[in-house]
Amino acid sequence: MKQYTIEELNNLKKEEVVALMVQLQKQNDILTEQLAVMQAKRFGRSTERLDCLGQTNLFNEVEDTCDETQPEPEIEDAAVVVKKAKRPAGKLDKDLAGLPCREELHELSEDELNSIFGVDGWKRLPDEIYRNLEYHPSTKEVVEHHIAVYASKKGPEIARAPHPVELFSHSIATPSLVAAIMNAKYTNAMPLYRIGQEFQRNGVNLSEPTMANWVNQSAGRYLSEFRDRLRSELLRFPVIQADETTCLVNKDGREGHSKSWMFVYRSGELYRDKAVIIYDYQKTRGSEHFDAFLQGYSGILVSDAYSGYHALDRRRDDIQIAHCWAHARRDFADAVKALKQKGGPGKQRIKKTIAYQALERIASIYALEEDWKDLPADERRSRRQEHSKPLVEAYFAWAKEIDQDSVISQKTKDGLNYSIRQERYLKAFLNNGEIPIDNSASERAIRPFCVGRSNWHMIDTVKGAQASAIVYSIVETAKANNLKPYEYLKYLLTEIPKHIEDKDARKTYLNDLLPWSENLPNICKKPT
C-alpha cells in the first residue's frame, strides 16, 4: 500500500479518500482475522468439528442446547433412580489377561478357628477371591558371564562355551538396556538427560554421550538394514501417504541453524492388515528426496499441496498424486474459529458465512466415508462414484461461482483458492477405493516426532538425525501393528546381531522379524 505524506492526503479527492478508506478497512479486516486465528490456535480447541452435524461443543453445551420455550418438567418426570454403573461381565478378567498372577493365601490357624467355633465346630467354605494389581518399577541387575575355556592336552586347540552375542565389544550395553533407552526417547519422548536422571535415581550412572553412542551405533550397525527391509515392504503398497516437518541439526556442515527436514512415508490408511511407517531425514525439502526414497515405486502418493509433490507428479509417470481434504477444509475452519472469538457475530450469522457452508459441504462427504471405512476397496469406489461424486462436483461448482471480491475473510478466500487450484488432486480419491479421503494418517504418524522435538529441541549431529529416523521407523511401525515397542526393539537387538555376519541367511531371518511375522514371539504383541 502506498505511503502518503500529510500534504498528499490533504490534496486527495473525495473519491480517492473513499477508495483509501475501503482499502484500509480491508487490511484491518485481514489483520483482525489473522489475530483471531492466532488466538484460536493458541487458546482454542484444535478441532474442525461442526455443531451442525450434531457434534456438540461440550464447553458451550448450555448455550448450544438451551430452549427457553421448553416447559419445566413435573417432579415425577424429573425424578430418576440413580443406579451404580456395573462393570461388564468378564471385563476384569480381560483387563488382567496375560499378566503373571501370584496367589496369596489368607487363612486362620486351627487354634484361632477353635476359639471362634469350638473344637471341630467349623467347616471350610469356598474362598472369597478378589484381585488387585501390583506395580514394580523397572529392575536392574548385573549379569556376570563366566565362559568356560578348554584347551587340548596334546595340541594348541582351544574351545570356548557358547555365550550371547555382545552388541558392542567390552561394553555393558545389552539389548534390554539399549531398547529401554530407545523406548524412553522415541516412544515416550524423553530427552537423554532425563533418561539419565531416571537411571541415576535407580542407582545406575549412564552419561548422555554414552547413551547417544549406543543408540547411534545400534541404529547404524543393526537396525538400518531392517529399516531398509521395511522400506522395500512399503514400496509394495499401491497407496503411500507422505508428510514432512522441520527439525534443527546442530552439526550438519551448514552455518547457523539451517532448517533440516524429517519426512514420513506410511502405507495407505485403508490397508488394515499390515502397516509400515518409515522416517527419512534430509537436509533440505527438495523433491529429489521423494525421487530417491520412491525409487522403483509405482502407485499413488497421498500428500498435501507442497510444490515438491507436484514436481514429482510432473517428472514421474509411474506416480499419481492425490491430495488431502483435511487441508482443503483447514482455512475454512480457521475462518469460523476467528469469527467465534469475542466480539464475533452470533451463531446464526456464522452459519450463513461461506466458510461455514464450505465446512458443511465437506462434512457431508466425510460422513459418507465414515460409513464406508470397513468396506472392500471395490465396493468403496462404487459407492463413491454413486454418492460422493455428486457432492464433490457440487462443491467445486459452488466454490467457482463465488465472487471473491465480495468475500471479506482472507482465510475464506485462501480456502476457496486452495480447493479450486487442487481440484484435480482432491478428486483423485473418487476413482480409487484404496485412496483415503485425507492425509491425516501420515500427520498422526509424524506427530510423535513433533512431540519429542518440543522436548529436546534440536539434534546434535547428522548421524544422530539418521539414527532417530531409523528408530522412529521401527517404533511407529511396531505401534501401528499392535506390538510393544520396547519388547520389539529388544527382540530385534537380540536376534539381528546373531546373523550380522551371515549374508546368505539375511533375507530369511529379516522376514522372520517383520512385525506381522508368525514367528514373532508373543511377548512382542499387545494383548488383544
Image: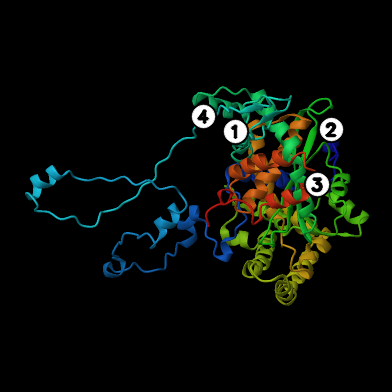
Whichever of labels 2 and 3 marks the residue nearer the N terminus, that label is: 2
- Residue 411 higher or lower than 54, as above or below: above
Question: Mark 4 belongs to which amino acid?
Answer: Glu
Label 4: few (<14), some or many (≥20) within 10 Å?
Answer: few
Q: At x 91% / y 56%, what residue is drawn?
A: 316
Q: Tell me the residue that label 1 is attached to.
A: 177
Q: Amino acid at mark 3?
A: Asp
The earlier-in-sequence mark between 4 and 1 is 4
The one nearer the camera, 281 or 444, is 281
Q: Viewer-nearest of labels 1 and 3?
A: 3
Distance CA(mark 1)–CA(mark 2): 71 Å
Residue denoted by label 2: 5
Element at label 1: helix
| Distance (Cα) linking label 2 and label 3 | 81 Å
Give the quarter of the image for residue 154.
Answer: top right
Q: Which residue is mark 4?
A: 141
* Residue 261 in view: yes
Q: Quadrant of the N terminus?
A: top right
The answer to whether one can see residue 408 in this image is no
* First of labels 4, 3 by sequence position: 4
Disc marking residue 149: none
* Residue 504, label in figure: 3
Q: Residue at x 61, y 33 (%)?
A: 181
In the rendered image, the vertical position of residue 223 relative to residue 213, given as above or below: below
Q: Amino acid at mark 2?
A: Thr
Q: In the depicted view, which residue is nearer to us: 387 or 148?
A: 148
Q: Is residue 495 left or right of residue 243?
A: left
Kindly check if marks 1 and 3 are in contact, taking CB atoms under 8 A apart as contact.
no
Closer to the camera: disc 2 or disc 3? 3
Residue 435 in the image, given as x and y percentages of width and height: 75, 63
